[in-house]
Each structure stands twice: as structure tokens, then as C-alpha cells.
Amino acid sequence: MRTLELEMCKKDGTAVWVEIVARFLRDEKFSPDRILGTSRDITQRKRLEERMKQTQKMEALGTLAGGIAHDFNNILSSIIGFTELAKLDLSDNPEALGSLDQVMTAGLRARDLVQHILTFSRKADVQHQVIKIVPLVKECLKFIKASAPPDIAIRKKMMEKDVAVLADPTQIHQMIMNLLTNAVHAMKETGGTLDVTITSMVIHTDEILQTQNISSGRYVKILISDTGCGIPEALAEKIFEPFFTTKRRGEGTGMGLSTVYGIVKDLKGDISVYSEPGKGTTFQVLIPEKRPDADQEITLTRAALITGKGSILVVDDEPSIVAWTSKVLAKLGYGVAGVSGGQKALDMLAQDPDRFDLVITDLAMPKMDGLALSQQIKRICPDIPIILCTGFSEGLKTDLVANCHIFAMIMKPMIASELSAIVNKALKTCRQKEKTQ
């Protein structure tokens, strides 16, 4: 008996998988003279097997991501941090600043790549904030314009300039950059036009079936269109699958659109695509709109550096991170002391509990991690705010962080503007509490 699995085509051209089981029927002389066979459609089974393979790939990628994220983000922290310090010292040297900008851009791309992998493997630390979409999209368009071929025209139409969503800024940045990069790639051979449109719309209950069962309500609609090569109809259903790509080796990983899909679905939104081969492609993204309260802060990404006053203790097992963090904070006006381990930090606090206004500590440190250190610090200085830095926070439960009295968490590798903003917020909140007591 023989069993074969074959991919075949139906009369209408649809591909199906068929399992054929055949055995020879023998005559009285035991010579095979007939074949008895059965066949059945196993297309659904093959699809299920393929999904299982993709799941295994996801699990393997997740394990890899968790293993490299912390160490790799520590390396990037030094690269990005010392680059920013050098830029501050060379503010009167345009040529050197241009070179450092290239290093900074590469470092941020590497940081985004790590975050991209963590997001894709569902191991990213997601911090939802109310963010304005238009400034973020404009920032992405600046990056794209700088790298796009000159024969690609970029047009933007921002109908609603103040629309906001509740999302993680890094994820929204990833989503927009992936869609824009794909659009430019589709036009790199022939040139064309990239159109970006942002509007606000209301979806009513009777329209839900047309938008794949998302909830009714107000949405931000983002349209990204290109006049490139288009997507063949046979491939349109596969473009959001993990690791699926039509790009040549070295041009793409197949993770981009699957990551976009995951981000949009996590936000309770919807993404759809319309494409005609040879004419172009349009992606439509719908994200629930968030209308902030009057006293609610609208977060903009990559804000300017914020100066301040106060005494800060920096704790990290990586001396380079202690060095650049301390130097950045010193340039912003703070008094800073840095130590390379939890016990040294405790000894310093025990000698003078009132010396510091804030502690910034790494999470993953030998002998005493950031959470254990925070608990010990609170016994010595109950009111001091603590900021926890981490390059990989999977499994770090919110209640565990709260029990250790952590004021805020920040993901590595951080840039100076992010560091200055969270430090300013922590000190301002602490001082306001002191005034009310």
C-alpha cells in the first residue's frame, strides 16, 4: 500500500491538496494487475499543519527574542547614549554632527528591530498612552522621504490634525513605517506616488459586517496608497501571514505586515488591503479614536530634553550605561552618583538616606535584581521614587511592580529625551505629594 500527498488544481483553477491511498490487487499468480485507490481532499488539514509550523516558528522566535533582547539592548544603550553625549559636546561642528546623526539613526533602527521582534513574538512591553497620530505620521514620512528614490512623490492629506488614539507610540511608529516602507519598495523600479491620508470617521452598528466585526464607534482612518506593482490576487490572502514575503533574499523577513496585523488587532482595530496588479495598492487601517479629557495629557514622541534640579542615584551592572546615564543627567542639571551593583546602592543610601531625590535602577542585575533592590530601598527611604529600566519585561507582572513601589518603567535602550521626560515627571510628582502632606 502506498500513500501520496499531491497538490492538484480543480477545474476552476483552485489549488487543493489530495491524499491518495493505493494498493495493488494481485491475481492468482500474485502478479499485480489492478490498483485499488482512494483519494480525499486534505486541504484543511494541510492548512492546519502549516499554521502549527508557523506557531512553532513563533515560539522559537520568542525564545530567541527573550534571550538576546536584554544583552542587545544594553549594547544599544551605550551606542545611543554616548552618541547623544558626543552631539551635545560638538554642537558647533556641523560635519561631526552629521556623522553622529548617521550613527544615531542606525542605533534607533537597531532598537526598533529588537522591539519589532519582541512585538512580533508577543513579548514586547506595551505601554498604551494617548498619542496624536498626525505628528507621528509626519515624523515617519520624514524618514521615508530621506531614503526614498527621487522619482517617488509623497503626498499627505491630514483631514484631522488633532485625532488621537490609545496605543503604544513605538508600535504605532512600527506600523506606519512598515506600511510606508512596503509602499516605497513597490515603486522602487518605476517610481510613482505615495499618498497618505488621515481622517476621522464613525462606524455604525449596521456597518460592522463590512469592517470584519469591529465594534461600532469613532475611528481614525489611515490610508496609505502607492502606484507600484500591486499584489497578485492569489497572494493577497497571504500577505499578513508570518514569514511570508515576495521580496528577494536580504530585502525582507516576512515579519512586517504580520506585525502590523498583530498591532492593529491588539488595538481592536481593522486593516484591509485593495490592490490591482500593475496599478498599485491601498492599505486601510482603522484604530479606535481616543478623545482625551480636558486634563488628560497628549503624548508626543521624542520630545525635547527637559532640564531640572535634584540628586539622582543610578544603579546598573553595566559600567558604560552608568557612565552615559550619569553624564546625560548631569548635563540636564542634576546631581548624579552612579554605582554598579545593588549592594553598593544600599550602602550609599544607608549612610545618608536624605541624599537622593530619585533612584534609577536596572532590572536584570546579578546577586540582587532591580525589584529586590527596590524593596530594600523602600525600607531605608520610604518616599523616594524609583524608575526601573529593563530591556526585556516578559513575565513582569503589574502587581509585582506595584508591590515594589516602582514609580515607572522605561524600556532600554532609552534615548535622552525619554530619560529626561520620565525623570522630570517622577520628581515633579514627588514634590507635589510633599506639598500636600
Image (spheres, rainbow, N blue to C red):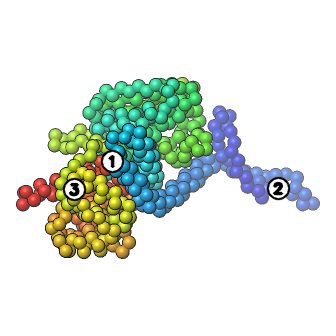
The mark closer to the camera, 2 or 3, is: 3
Q: Is residue 210 visible?
A: no
Instruction: Determine whether, in the image, residue 116 is placed left or right of residue 329.
Output: right
Mark positioned earlier in the residue sequence (2 or 1): 2
From the top left corner, tell me how far across and down residue 178 is, in percent. Answer: 46, 40
Contact, CB < 8 Å: mark 2 with mark 1? Answer: no
Amino acid found under the numbered disc labelled 3: Tyr
Where residue 262 appears, x then y in whole percent?
43, 47
Q: Is residue 164 above or below residue 322?
A: above
- Picture layout, residue 370 above or below residue 46: below
Residue 89 tag number: 1
Q: Are marks 1 and 3 in contact (CB under 8 Å)?
A: no
Q: CA distance from mark 2 to mark 1?
A: 84 Å
Give the Cα distance between marks 2 and 3. Answer: 86 Å
The answer to whether the residues at label 2 and label 3 have Cβ atoms under 8 Å apart is no
Which residue is more in the foreground, 343 or 160? 343
Residue type at mark 1: give it.
Asp
Q: Tag 2: residue type?
A: Phe
The percent position of residue 164, horizontal first and vertical second, equals 28, 38
Residue of label 3: 334
Q: Residues within 10 Å of mark 3 (few under 14, many from 20)?
A: some
- Indicate the secondary structure of the residue bearing disc 2: strand
